[in-house]
Image (tube, rainbow, N blue to C red):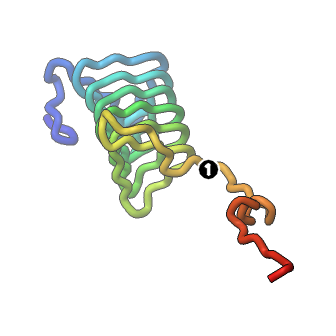
Amino acid sequence: MTINGFRLGAPDIAYIGAGVTVKGAIVVPDAIIVDGVVEGDVTAQSIRIGPSGAIKGNVISTDVDVSGTLADKADIKEFLLVRASGRVEGHVNCGDVQVERGAVLAGGIFSVYSAAADVRPVNDNTPRTAQSPMELAPSSEHRPKIDAAE
């Protein structure tokens, strides 16, 4: 039997079925498919969260495909895909990100396009402060000097 392209029963793959809740940390060498609920930290090479699935905890992975809910903090080395039915809440650092129309993003998503690039916020949800007119005016060094004798 295969689910999301993964063969169940294969070594190094874990499956959390719909209706199942797991509390605690999970470490999987290859892939984990979550159609139930995981309340705790998850570390795996690849993570697939199905439409009825949820992970509430810290996530460390190379790539994550979210159709359900990913909540708390995630460090994703290469690729985050948030499908139309997906919801991401919390703070996410990822290599590259793709978001389908209809997906919900609540929190900070930081994307790095290559290992050498600096982390930069895509949306850090901080309000922008208005600058005062004095900060917008050019400094006296750049203003033209007016001589009254001319």
Quadrant position of the C terminus in the picture: bottom right
Using a 10 Å C-alpha cutoff, classify the residue at mark 1 as few (fewer than 14 neighbours), some (14 to 19) or many (20 or more).
few
Residue shown at the point (14%, 31%) measured from the top left: 7
Q: Which image quarter: residue 145?
A: bottom right
Vertical placement of 106 versus 32: above or below? Answer: below
Q: How many marks?
A: 1
Quadrant position of the N terminus in the picture: top left
Q: Which image quarter: residue 129?
A: bottom right
Percent coordinates x, y for residue 119 in the rendering: 44, 38
Vertical placement of 21 versus 121: above or below? Answer: above
In this orientation, does residue 8 appear? yes
Q: Tell me the amino acid under the disc marked 1.
A: Asn
Q: Which residue is mark 1?
A: 125
Q: Secondary structure at mark 1?
A: loop
In this orientation, does residue 33 appear? no
Percent coordinates x, y for residue 85 in the rendering: 40, 54
Drawn side of residue 57 relative to residue 10, left or right: right
Of 25 and 81, the residue lying toward us: 81
Of 9 and 98, the residue lying toward us: 98
Residue shown at the point (47%, 38%) measured from the top left: 92
Percent coordinates x, y for residue 53 in the rendering: 40, 39
Residue found at the very far right of the displayed protein: 148
Vertical placement of 140 versus 7: above or below? Answer: below
Residue shown at the point (68%, 63%) measured from the top left: 142
Residue shown at the point (36%, 22%) measured from the top left: 43
Drawn side of residue 116 relative to residue 21, left or right: left
Q: Which image quarter: residue 103?
A: bottom left
Of 1 and 82, the residue lying toward us: 82
